[in-house]
Image: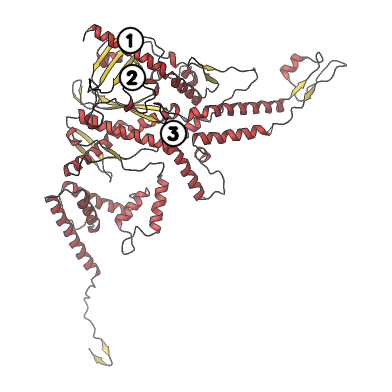
């Protein structure tokens, strides 16, 4: 690449980054203000320049205590949203037997990869960012230095998922609704120059910058959390440089898009987008966006912290003014005639019990000014502000305190109140589910692009059995990820257990003889969370597991100790849903018939009257022998 061409690219990207930073500045200021309020630094305000400045006291005696309700609101919301972990599956590309089989393999590969990559922890970290700042991002790319080491310094590679704060993302258009609507996205962050040399093989000089470097600032060393937020603008390490990555979407002239990396005036990389991570085998930007509350015509979302800041300020003011009034009632305010007493002594010691107060002869004795009583308006305003917290955040007193508002509240009313709370949070939960689904699609597409060599993954089956799955990119024919569970907030474990009890009371779990079969009992106990609770259920699990193993391996054999009913149900379900047609289906049909024949023989033997070994006595009627 010519030097002039590289210098032009560097200058254009750095200029583009500065323009986007200026356009994004109002959002960045709001995020910093949100973080200050969440961490407890609530006597601050945003300046027109974008800086966060402290608000000084009006009087030295003013109380400035912080009664932080914002942090508890965020923690409560996050604790509820952390239960949103959707179960994902892969939809087959077609109804062909091979596509159905590869889709099942892809689902197993996906579940194993999500467990290995710690997707749950990543979503938890991202949810914290989205709840405070309103938006978070996930970087889903390929790390060639991860995975098993195949040779000295050569690794098989693996997917890498990072949580990215909104401070690092600069879209080309603030009004774009989604990532796919942006023509390009810049990710800028402070990175150690040694790490840059390792990644790109080029030397970059350190630089000082005012970029927000959350990843490089540690709360500690005498800094409080609130002061650390204020020092983030100058918190970049001296051995760091600002790494600017610009991802440009594919166009007619550049069908594979553009990926350029710049640091301190040095062009580190220039080429096409590295990952085929979009539908239909197209290249795209390796980011997934998650918002807390979406906004119309805005790239970044909104946080409940932003809506709660005015209420938090008013609440702090009311509580502090109320405490100042109470201090006046407790300590009193004294009126003293000028020159009648020793003012310095009175200020230092006050009026202690039993103190002898000496005043000038002929002067008016000091007296306590009647402060009155605390106005009832303080209590009314405090309760009104607490109600506003609940209305704005969608977090009721039941969720925050984990107890009912009234002791006389019925169970049905309490359950209805909890469902209403969950409904308020369901919008944020849907954004998390959508982000998890998109991350899963990226994972499958990256494995399909880079997983050419055979790999081994540990798969845990439904019965807790661990198996090793050998797979490669050819085993992933579909990346159409779908949900297999509803929104977890709308269908909690308690709600599902209550539904199971209702089905049991209605008799819908019984067979035609009015009894619950061992298989139904096994599934019922599993749904209640007591799978394997007694010996009978353990035996049912063993029989079902044996039948499922026969279905997978195709080796059908009957033992005299088999539970024919469980085997018949398991084999029949597999025959009607998953078993491919052909010789295997024919062998399975014959195997089911043999189970039914042996089950019928066993039933006849059980119901038959056993013959007695004694000689039957004759029946005598009317004196005649028969």
The quarter in which the C terminus is drawn is: bottom left
Quadrant in the picture for the N terminus: top left
Compare residues 4 and 539 and report the one nearer the observer.
4
- Quick one: label 1, few (<14), some, or many (20+) residues within 10 Å? some
| Position in image of residue 296 (x %, y %) | 42, 30
The residue depicted at 24 percent of the width and 58 percent of the height is 565
Residue that carries the numbered disc 1 in the rendered image: 264
In which quarter of the view is residue 591 placed? bottom left
Q: From the viewer's perspective, is residue 570 above or below residue 355?
A: below
**Neighbourhood count class around disc 2 (C-alpha, 10 Å): few under 14, some 14–19, many 20 upward:** many
- The residue singled out by tag 2 in the image is 186
> Mark 3 and 1 residues: CB-CB less than 8 Å, in contact?
no
Question: Sequence order check: which comes first, mark 3 or mark 1?
Answer: 3
Query: Which label sits in the foreground, 2 or 1?
Result: 2
**SS at mark 2 in the image:** strand
Question: SS class of the residue under badge 1?
Answer: loop
Between the C-alphas of marks 2 and 1, the distance is 15 Å
- Mark 3–mark 1 distance (CA, rounded to whole Å): 38 Å
Residue under numbered circle 3: 78
Q: What residue sits 84% from the left and 15% below the top?
A: 360
Left or right: 430 in relation to 104: right
Sooner in the amino-acid sequence: mark 3 or mark 2: 3
Q: On the image, which quarter does residue 472 sit in?
A: top left
Q: Evaluate whether residue 156 shows in this view.
A: yes
Q: Nearer the viewer, mark 3 or mark 1?
A: 1
**Quick check: 97 left or right of 114?**
left
C-alpha separation, residue under disc 3 versus residue under disc 2:
28 Å
Residue placed furthest toward the top: 4
Closer to the N terminus: mark 2 or mark 1?
2
């Amino acid at each position: 690449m010519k030097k002039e061409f590289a210098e032009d690219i560097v200058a254009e990207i750095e200029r583009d980054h500065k323009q986007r930073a200026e356009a994004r500045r109002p959002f960045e200021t709001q995020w910093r203000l949100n973080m200050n309020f969440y961490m407890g630094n609530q006597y601050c305000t945003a300046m027109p320049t974008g800086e966060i400045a402290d608000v000084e006291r009006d009087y030295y005696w003013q109380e400035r205590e912080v009664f932080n309700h914002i942090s508890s609101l965020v923690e409560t919301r996050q604790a509820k949203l952390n239960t949103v972990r959707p179960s994902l599956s892969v939809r087959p590309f077609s109804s062909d037997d091979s596509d159905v089989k590869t889709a099942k393999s892809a689902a197993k590969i996906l579940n194993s990869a999500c467990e290995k990559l710690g997707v749950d922890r990543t979503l938890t970290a991202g949810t914290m960012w989205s709840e405070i700042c309103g938006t978070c991002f996930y970087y889903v790319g390929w790390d060639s230095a991860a995975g098993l080491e195949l040779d000295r310094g050569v690794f098989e590679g693996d997917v890498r998922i990072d949580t990215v704060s909104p401070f690092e993302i600069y879209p080309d258009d603030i009004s774009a609704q989604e990532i796919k609507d942006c023509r390009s996205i810049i990710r800028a962050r402070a990175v150690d120059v040694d790490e840059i040399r390792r990644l790109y093989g080029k030397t970059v000089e350190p630089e000082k910058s005012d970029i927000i470097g959350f990843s490089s600032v540690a709360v500690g060393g005498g800094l409080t959390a609130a002061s650390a937020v204020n020092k983030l603008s100058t918190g970049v390490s001296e051995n760091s440089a600002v790494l600017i990555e610009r991802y440009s979407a594919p166009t007619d002239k550049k069908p594979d898009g553009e990926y350029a990396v710049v640091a301190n005036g040095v062009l580190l990389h220039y080429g096409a987008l590295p990952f085929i991570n979009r539908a239909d085998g197209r290249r795209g930007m390796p980011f997934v966006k998650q918002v807390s509350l979406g906004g119309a015509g805005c790239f970044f979302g909104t946080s409940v912290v932003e809506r709660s800041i005015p209420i938090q300020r008013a609440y702090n003011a009311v509580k502090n003014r109320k405490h100042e009034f109470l201090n006046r009632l407790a300590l009193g305010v004294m009126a003293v005639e000028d020159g009648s007493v020793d003012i310095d002594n009175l200020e230092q010691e006050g009026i202690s019990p039993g103190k002898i107060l000496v005043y000038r002869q002929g002067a008016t004795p000091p007296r306590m000014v009647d402060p009155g009583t605390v106005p009832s308006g303080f209590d009314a305003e405090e309760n009104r502000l607490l109600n506003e917290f609940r209305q704005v955040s969608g977090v009721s007193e039941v969720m925050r305190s984990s107890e009912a508002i009234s002791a006389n509240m019925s169970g049905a009313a309490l359950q209805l109140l909890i469902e209403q709370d969950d409904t308020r949070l369901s919008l944020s939960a849907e954004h998390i589910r959508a982000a998890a689904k998109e991350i899963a699609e990226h994972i499958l597409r990256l494995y399909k692009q880079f997983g050419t060599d055979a790999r081994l993954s540990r798969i845990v089956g439904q019965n807790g059995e661990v198996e090793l799955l050998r797979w490669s990119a050819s085993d992933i024919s579909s990346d159409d990820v779908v949900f297999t569970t509803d929104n977890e907030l709308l269908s909690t474990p308690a709600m599902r257990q209550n539904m199971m009890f209702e089905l049991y009371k209605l008799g819908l779990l019984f067979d035609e003889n009015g009894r619950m079969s061992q298989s139904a009992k096994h599934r019922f106990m599993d749904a209640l969370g007591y799978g394997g609770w007694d010996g009978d259920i353990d035996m049912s699990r063993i029989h079902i597991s044996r039948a499922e193993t026969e279905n997978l391996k195709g080796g059908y054999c009957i033992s005299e100790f088999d539970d024919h009913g469980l085997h018949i149900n398991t084999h029949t379900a597999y025959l009607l849903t998953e078993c491919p047609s052909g010789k295997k289906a024919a062998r399975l049909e014959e195997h089911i018939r043999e189970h039914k024949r042996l089950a019928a023989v066993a039933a006849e033997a059980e119901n038959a009257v056993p013959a007695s070994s004694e000689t039957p006595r004759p029946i005598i009627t009317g004196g005649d022998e028969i």
